[in-house]
Image: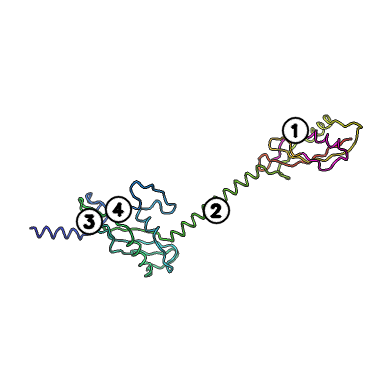
Amino acid sequence: MTCLAVMTIKAQDQKIYTSDDAAKDKSITPPVFKLYADGQLLLTDPIVGNLPEEVQWMVMNYRKPTDVPARVDVQISYIVERDGKLSNIQINKYRPEYESITTPPSSFKSEIRRLLGSMKKWTPAKKQGRAIRFKMESSLYLFDYAKAIKEKVDYYRALKEDEDSEKKLEESNKNKVYDFVEELPSFPGGLKALIEWIQRNQKKPEGDPVGRCILNFVVEKDGSLSGIKVMRSSGNEKLDEESIRLIKTMPRWNPGKQNGKNVRCRYTLDIPFL
């Protein structure tokens, strides 16, 4: 009787359980691979973060052989032994992207053996609290992870640089003074109102000199005027000074617009003294 019990236990020790067994028998707990220690801050990987931890580890530690295509869809099976080590590693499916080859080269087989052989120990499966052998299957999409991460980092860096450039351009455009805009700045009431305002507020210097002063100034976003410069003198300093005074005392203008937004705009005005 004792001998039979020992033989039964040995037979159970050699039995390989599967996920189907675990689904039927609630006393079976499948093996567990922990990529992250309990309590460790888990940062979601931008490429494999949503995959099971054992698959994450395999993808991140895969070293692509030189004769293997860039991306390969594979399915592998292996047994998690009672001591947490892996054995009986098999490649059940090998399907390179954009290729019809289904037989993996020897270099790929060696890499899969190396990859799984270098994994840290699993927590073995258990049946009624006793460690058991358990067959696992993993579907993997293998690629050069380090290269993919670099490409991802380069992409986000370029994106950030583009965003920074756009912000700098936007900031620069805020202070940009336009020479040509879709909608020109204007005096309230239009050109006729401008002429009337100048005639009404013009103060001729003593001696009643005549001349024509051409000035350039900036109509700000709020309609105020700044940066007043004499572009062509009237030939009379007093007339030039009066022209500048007139510009400074003008009411706010209607600002120029570009893409529907108020912008700073240069404006040239000819003030005659007749």
Nearer to me, 65 or 8: 65
Question: Residue 100 vs residue 27: left or right?
Answer: right
Circle 2 residue: 158
Outermost residue, bottom side: 106
Numbered label attached to residue 188: 1
- Could you say where residue 258 lies in the image, as x and y percent from the top left? 68, 43
Mark 1 is on which residue type? Pro
- State which tag comes first along the sequence, 3 or 2: 3
Residue positioned 39% across, 61% down in the render: 62
Label 2 element class: helix
Whether residue 2 is in magenta: the answer is: no
Residue positioned 41% across, 48% down in the render: 43
| C-alpha separation, residue under disc 3 versus residue under disc 1 | 90 Å
Q: Neighbour class for label 4 at 10 Å: few (<14), some, many (≥20)?
A: some
> Given this view, does label 3 or label 1 mark the residue nearer the observer?
3
Say whether marks 2 and 4 touch (CB < 8 Å): no
> Given this view, does label 1 or label 2 mark the residue nearer the observer?
2
Numbered label attached to residue 32: 4
Label 4 element class: loop
Whether residue 233 is in magenta: the answer is: yes
- State which tag comes first along the sequence, 3 or 1: 3
- Could you say where residue 94 lies in the image, as x and y percent from the top left? 37, 64
Q: Which residues are magenta?
A: 228-256
Q: Neighbour class for label 2 at 10 Å: few (<14), some, many (≥20)?
A: few
| C-alpha separation, residue under disc 1 versus residue under disc 2 | 46 Å
Circle 3 residue: 132
| C-alpha separation, residue under disc 2 versus residue under disc 4 | 39 Å
